[in-house]
Amino acid sequence: MKAQRLEIRNLRSLRQAWLDPDPRLNLLVGDNGAGKTSVLEALHVMAYGRSFRGRIGDGLVRTSADALEIFVQWQEDGQDRIRKAGLRHGGQDWEGRLDGLKVAQLGELCAALMVVTIEPGCHALVSGGGEPRRRFMDWGLFHVEQGFLADWRRYARSLKQRNALLKARTPASQLLPWELELATAGERLTRARRLYLERLEASVAWAMDALAPGLGAPRLEFHPGWRQDEVSLADALVNAQERDRSLGYTSIGPHRGDWRLRLEGLPNDEPLSRGQAKIAAISCLLGQARDCATQRGDWPIVSVDDLASELDRSHQRRLVETLVSTGAQVFMTGTEEPQAVAGHAGRVFHVEHGVVAASPAT
Ligand SMILES: Nc1ncnc2c1ncn2[C@@H]1O[C@H](COP(=O)(O)OP(=O)(O)OP(=O)(O)O)[C@@H](O)[C@H]1O
């Protein structure tokens, strides 16, 4: 995917910004607090319905404005059709348009535009809690597996119902229909997640080999969220009823599913440094982008916020060269032009006090 036009209004310090990006590497340069990350947040919001720095309601709308506005025009690789998405979001209320038509759900915009964001906090993907890893799996499946979203919604709906009944201490017989629904959708979700991670391993290995061969071959170890090797989800839910009733929520199932990155170069699971964790996480994200490209014939847009954060020069160079070799469109921020980017940037944007200005690449 190649963004041809990006317009942003009232997002943090950006009152109004327009960018006509290069189809390859775009560099956003400026001092701390200038508004570089906010440009990447705009792309991320359109692709995920939230920022990588929190929800839209949590300070994304410019102080004194009612709502932020984002417009993206892009073309999918190998397609003539020009696509356009617009979003106006006030933190609660929102309006979205896709190719000129009003959308009923934010998910329609998220399904259209694929963006993979590499940001300073992304090391949490390998060293943090399960939530970002579940989102990672489900984002990949959402974009490459038809039918996954329907199963995911079915699961989320029945989980909500079961939890409400548990809280109300409803008799076990009334839980059963929801448990059946939960188990059917949950087993399907789990099968899709397992197959996805098995396939993804090769793409993560490709990225790891390019970025940090010393860490060795990766293995993505799947945890379904219950003892799937011993019992079906339907039986596990019945077995957990007593405990869940006292807890007031469903304690097992795919909503507790997870995966862990295991590295051949660290056979005893020695802890990774922050920089190593970041490189490992970047490898997972790049692997995911490559899997999308293989499955859909179209690379997602890749955003890299603060290239220099946690990465030494050699890893910065490896990352830039790997990204350039894929042909993906890349947006990258830095307080100055990183050495690793020299000669690669198609367009440089200078960001100062919330104003974005393009200048020819040097
Ligand atoms: N809701 C808001 N309204 C107005 N300004 C805001 C709002 N939220 C944040 N800001 C301002 O926007 C700026 C943050 O911009 P951003 O994080 O994009 O900068 P940056 O160039 O990426 O900085 P750094 O290099 O430090 O990461 C800060 O100056 C901050 O005070």
Image (cartoon, rainbow, N blue to C red):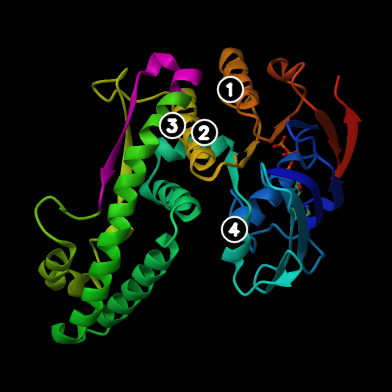
| Amino acid residing under circle 1 | Thr
Q: Up-down: is 150 above or below 81? A: below
Q: Which residue position is annotated with label 1?
A: 322
Residue 163 counted in the magenta span:
no
- Mark-to-mark CA distance, 1 and 3: 13 Å
Q: Is residue 49 visible?
A: no
Whichever of callouts 1 and 4 sits on the residue coming sooner in the sequence is 4
**Dot 2 corresponds to which residue?**
286
Mark 1 vs mark 3: which is more N-terminal?
3
Q: Are marks 1 and 4 in contact (CB under 8 Å)?
A: no
Which residue is labeled 4 in the image?
Answer: 110
Q: Which mark is residue 203?
A: 3
Secondary element type, mark 1:
helix
Q: Quadrant of the N terminus?
A: top right
Whether tag 2 and tag 3 are in contact, CB under 8 A, the answer is yes
Dividing the picture into quarters, in which one does residue 90 lie? bottom right
Which quarter of the image is occupied by the C terminus? top right
Disc 3: CA contacts within 10 A as few (<14), some (14-19) or many (>=20): many
**Can residue 15 be seen at all in this image of the molecule?**
yes
Q: Looking at the image, which residue is at 73% across and 31% down?
A: 24
Q: CA distance from mark 4 to mark 2?
A: 19 Å
Relative to 148, residue 140 above or below: above
